[in-house]
Amino acid sequence: MQLPQINFKKTALVLAIVVVFNLFVNYGIDTLYKKQPVWGDFCGEKAARQHTDQESCEEAGERWNDNREFGEPVPLKAVPAYPEAAPAPTLYPRQNGWCDTAYRCGKEFEAADNLYRRNAFLVWVIIGVAALTGGIILTTAEAVSLGFTFGGLLAILVGTAKYWSQMDDYLRFVILGFSLTALIWVGVKKIKD
């Protein structure tokens, strides 16, 4: 039994197409669509503001948090035999609550980030499916065909991974079902043993 010969030039071309294709899609999204939202653009200076009471916090549109979950303050136990030079422990007054100054801007950031991720996901998947399909249909240059097939597969994987945590379970189910159906159809129609 003879081992198959590996064509390193062809393998290098396939890997290069996979990598460059996905870099092209990524930078295309950043250049033509917009860059991914950054937390600091939404909450940089806003989160630094301090509100010491519930009224001013809520007037600013932020969320006031009570300290109820922490229970009552526990007094420090007196330590016997303090050296004369050492100061006695001090009990600081317990704060009744705190203002989450990043609440509103955090919600704005989350909405913008989810919208960006959804739109980028759609671009990744559409371009990935097109490349995958084109790679399977293209039969004249095997290395180019394999490069676009694997590049499209990686693009679908990258797009899905970036948006997966924000997806609804039903959308995940539909996408996986569609992907599985498409792959089975392509395998039956286009790939012969």
Image (spheres, rainbow, N blue to C red):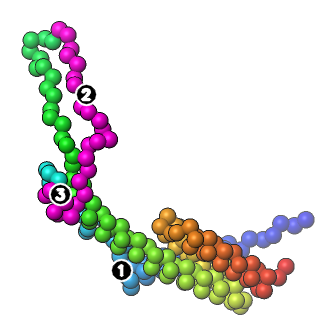
* Nearer to the camera, 189 or 10: 189
Of badges 2 and 1, nearer the viewer stands: 2
What residue is shown at x 25% (from left), y 68% (from top)?
A: 41
Query: What residue appears at the point 36 percent right and 67 percent down from the top-left corner?
Result: 110
**Horizontal side, residue 45 vs residue 124: left or right:** left
Residue positioned most to the left? 85
Q: Is residue 192 magenta?
A: no
Circle 2 packing at 10 Å, graded few (<14), some (14-19), many (20+), is few
Q: In what element is the residue under mark 2?
A: loop
Asked whether the viewer can see residue 45, the reply is: no
- Residue 87 position in % (x across, y down): 11, 20
Q: What residue lies at 79% left-to-right and 82% top-to-bottom? A: 188
Q: Please check the rendered image and state whether residue 67 is part of the magenta-colored stretch, yes or no.
A: yes
Q: Position of residue 65 (x, y in %)?
A: 26, 50
| Quarter of image, res 132 | bottom right
How far apart are the alpha carbons under marks 2 and 3?
A: 27 Å
**Residues at discs 2 and 3 in contact (Cβ within 8 Å):** no
**CA–CA distance in space, label 2 to label 1:** 51 Å
Q: Amino acid at mark 2?
A: Val
User: If you read the primary sequence from the N terminus, does the residue marked by circle 2 or circle 3 appear first?
Assistant: 3
- Which residue is under mark 1? 34
Q: Amino acid at mark 3?
A: Cys
Give the distance between the C-alpha atoms of the residues marked 3 and 1, in whole angstroms: 33 Å
Instruction: Report the residue that reaches farthest toward the top.
Output: 81
Amino acid type indicated by mark 1? Lys
Which residue range is magenta in the image?
A: 55-81
Q: Which quadrant holds residue 160? A: bottom right
Which residue is tagged 2?
74
Q: Foreground: 66 or 41? A: 66
Give residue 40's quadrant in the image.
bottom left
Q: Quadrant of the C terminus?
A: bottom right
Q: Which mark is residue 57?
A: 3
